[in-house]
Amino acid sequence: MNFFHTPSPGVVAITGASAGVGRTIAHQFARAGWRIRLIARDTEALEEVKQEVEQFGGSAVEQTAYGSSSVSQYK
């Protein structure tokens, strides 16, 4: 089954959406008409991806993820 093309596209959240595989997946969902939540750390790149998604016919909301590179805070 090709889940990008369903009779009734839904909503999908994509982490790492500002580059690479995440960006490519966002493009694929956009072409199929899905509503997309774009999540990544790079705010400027997310805005670019949002514009690309809209050009492909999808709709998107971007969300900047704030993370820490230090694992010690979770111990």
Image (tube, rainbow, N blue to C red):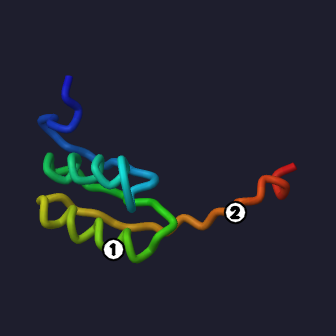
Would you name the residue on which mark 1 appears?
47
In this figure, which residue is indicated by the disc labeled 2?
Answer: 68
Quarter occupied by the N terminus: top left
Q: Position of residue 13 (x, y in %)?
A: 39, 51
- Which residue corresponds to the image point at 19% horizontal and 53% vertical from the top-left? 30
Q: How many marks?
A: 2
Report the amino acid beneath label 2: Ser
* Residue nearest the observer in this picture, 29 or 10: 29
Q: Residue furthest right?
A: 75
Q: Residue furthest top?
A: 1
Q: Residues within 10 Å of mark 2 (few under 14, many from 20)?
A: few
Mark identifier at residue 60: none
Q: Amino acid at mark 1?
A: Glu
In this rendering, position of residue 73 left or right of residue 66: right
Residue 54 rendering spot, x and y as whole percentages = 17, 66
Element class at badge 1: helix
| Residue 23 point in image, percent of width and height | 32, 55
Q: Please tell me which of labels 2 and 1 falls first in the chain.
A: 1
> Residue 39 occupies which quadrant of the picture?
bottom left
Q: Residue at x 38, y 67 (%)?
A: 62
Measured Cα–Cα span from mark 2 to mark 1? 22 Å
Residue 5 appears at what percent x and percent y?
15, 36
Q: Residue at x 20, y 38 (%)?
A: 4
Q: Picture quarter containing residue 51?
A: bottom left
> Farthest front residue?
20
The residue that appears at 60% across and 67% down in the rendered structure is: 66
Quick one: label 1, few (<14), some, or many (20+) residues within 10 Å?
A: some
Front residue of 18 and 56: 18
